[in-house]
């Protein structure tokens, strides 16, 4: 189970989009015959694969944050409403939010990210970043619930 938790399915979603674009390019340049059946099969296959990887990414994986910065970060866990330290070169799972150098970041489910040496949060994949934005992950969320006050005060 740990290997699945550590694996970032966002990368596979990124690869499925790249493969879809290559397939469409090969059809457009007529390297692959432009029959409607082949086009439909390619499109449906890659869209289904992409959706499966995105669903696994969003619903089957814990949020994973690794601190590679030289400063202490603080995290709010999903399971309980307490704030913990995230020391340098440490990875934690099941995180709802992180505070780095006074900046608070909300981290939606499935987010795999690293706190870089400059203290900024880096999301690991293009698909992961898009989901991060769409699902409400961003710096200094405006409408934080009251259980986030502990993180604000650190």
Image (spheres, grey):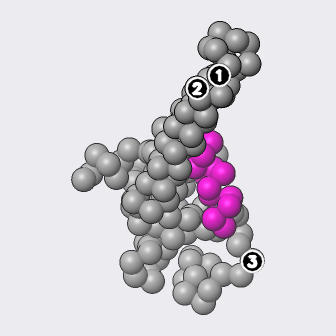
Q: Which residue is mark 3?
A: 142
Q: Residues within 10 Å of mark 3 (few under 14, many from 20)?
A: few
Q: Residue at x 71, y 81 (%)?
A: 143
Q: Quadrant of the C terminus?
A: bottom right
Q: Is residue 96 above or below residue 53?
A: below
Give the mark, 3 or 1, whose residue is nearer the N terminus.
1
**Residue nearest the viewer, comparing 65 with 85:** 65
Seen as rendered, the residue at the extreme left is 1
How much space separates mark 2 and mark 1, taking CA atoms? 6 Å
Q: Is residue 19 above or below residue 74?
A: above
How much space separates mark 3 and mark 1, taking CA atoms? 50 Å
Disc 2 vs disc 1: Cβ atoms closer than 8 Å?
Answer: yes
Nearer to us of marks 3 and 2 is 2
Q: Which residue is mark 1?
A: 35
Q: Residue at x 41, y 48 (%)?
A: 89
Nearer to us of marks 3 and 1 is 1
| Rendered location of residue 139, percent (x, y) | 70, 64
Q: Residues within 10 Å of mark 2 (few under 14, many from 20)?
A: few
Q: Which residue is mark 2?
A: 38
Range drawn in magenta = 119-136
| Rendered location of residue 61, percent (x, y) | 41, 58
């Amino acid at each position: 189970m740990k290997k699945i938790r550590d694996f970032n399915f966002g990368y596979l979603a990124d690869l499925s989009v790249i493969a879809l674009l290559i397939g469409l390019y090969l059809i457009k340049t007529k390297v692959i015959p432009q029959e409607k059946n082949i086009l439909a099969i390619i499109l449906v296959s890659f869209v289904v694969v992409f959706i499966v990887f995105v669903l696994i990414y969003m619903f089957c994986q814990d949020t994973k944050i690794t601190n590679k910065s030289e400063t202490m970060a603080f995290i709010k866990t999903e399971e309980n409403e307490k704030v913990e330290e995230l020391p340098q070169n440490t990875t934690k799972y099941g995180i709802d939010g992180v505070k780095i150098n006074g900046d608070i970041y909300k981290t939606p489910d499935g987010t795999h990210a690293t706190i870089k040496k400059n203290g900024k949060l880096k999301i690991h994949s293009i698909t992961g970043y898009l989901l991060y934005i769409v699902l409400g992950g961003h710096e200094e969320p405006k409408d934080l619930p009251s259980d986030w006050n502990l993180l604000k005060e650190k």
